[in-house]
Image: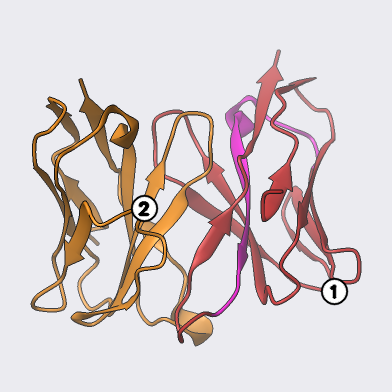
Amino acid sequence: GAGVSQTPSNKVTEKGKYVELRCDPISGHTALYWYRQSLGQGPEFLIYFQGTGAADDSGLPNDRFFAVRPEGSVSTLKIQRTERGDSAVYLCASSLTASGASDTQYFGPGTRLTVL
Amino acid sequence: RKEVEQDPGPFNVPEGATVAFNCTYSNSASQSFFWYRQDCRKEPKLLMSVYSSGNEDGRFTAQLNRASQYISLLIRDSKLSDSATYLCVVRALTGGGNKLTFGTGTQLKVEL
């Protein structure tokens, strides 16, 4: 079946611009997660949605970052006034539930963001 | 100090060798433990969960020592296709959720 998809696969933008990154989770998965992976590092948690609501946004680095999931399926990560330090691969993951035996997180291929 | 620490490597081993990776974690509230594999420029994929009793999946064996907060992965009879970065991952349930904390990864290169 279809896995987690993310668009665009690559995004190059200029410092100060606004970007939106999209994640389409596996159908039926109620939990959705965003992570950020910088070069040479492991993924770092940003935000987690259970359904439409953000259950944990403790990983968002500052108020330039915002994410939504209005219908409990597709999610958009929004970054305002991008900075060069925002350059990274942004990974989305989904899981059937957020606890118990069905909580394995499946990752999408990521969006590689480059801020010039 | 990072929550999950791993030796970044690289570990360069010949085909057929046995190789072991170690990982330590600092959050004693961590409840679940995993090894993920990540190929170059690809997404992480779950390799195996790690249980206190130790568990094996083919050539891969994972061990957990809760008292020492230490996790290991052993790969026997390594193959060229095992070349990848291996990420040690822990999970502490927060807010009813499922946040994963990753180590920096250990790079493995299996050579002819």
Residue B33 percent location from the top left of the image = 66, 66
The way the protein has been coloured in the rendering is by chain
Residue B103 percent location from the top left of the image = 62, 47
Please tell me whether residue B29 is drawn above or below residue B99 in the rendered image. Answer: below
**Picture colour for chain A:** orange
- How many tags in the picture? 2
The residue indicated by pointer 1 is B53
* In this picture, residue A1 sits left or right of residue B7: left
Q: Nearer the viewer, residue A24 or B7?
A: B7
Residue at 30 percent across and 51 percent down: it is A108
Q: Chain of mark 2?
A: A
Using the numbered discs, state the Cα–Cα distance from disc 1 to disc 2 in whole angstroms: 37 Å
To the question of a shared chain for discs 1 and 2, the answer is no
Q: Nearer the viewer, residue B44 or A85?
A: A85
Q: Chain of mark 1?
A: B
The residue indicated by pointer 2 is A61
Whether B84 is among the magenta residues is: yes
Number of other residues with Cα within 10 Å of mark 1, as a class: few under 14, some 14 to 19, many 20 or more: few
Locate residue A75: give its quadrant.
Answer: bottom left
**Picture colour for chain B:** red
Marks 1 and 2: CB-CB under 8 Å? Answer: no
The amino acid beneath tag 1 is Ser
Residue B63 percent location from the top left of the image = 82, 61
Locate residue A11: give its quadrant.
Answer: top left
Please tell me whether residue A60 is drawn above or below residue B112 in the rendered image. Answer: below
The amino acid beneath tag 2 is Pro
Q: Nearer the viewer, residue A91 or A81?
A: A81
Residue A9 percent location from the top left of the image = 19, 36
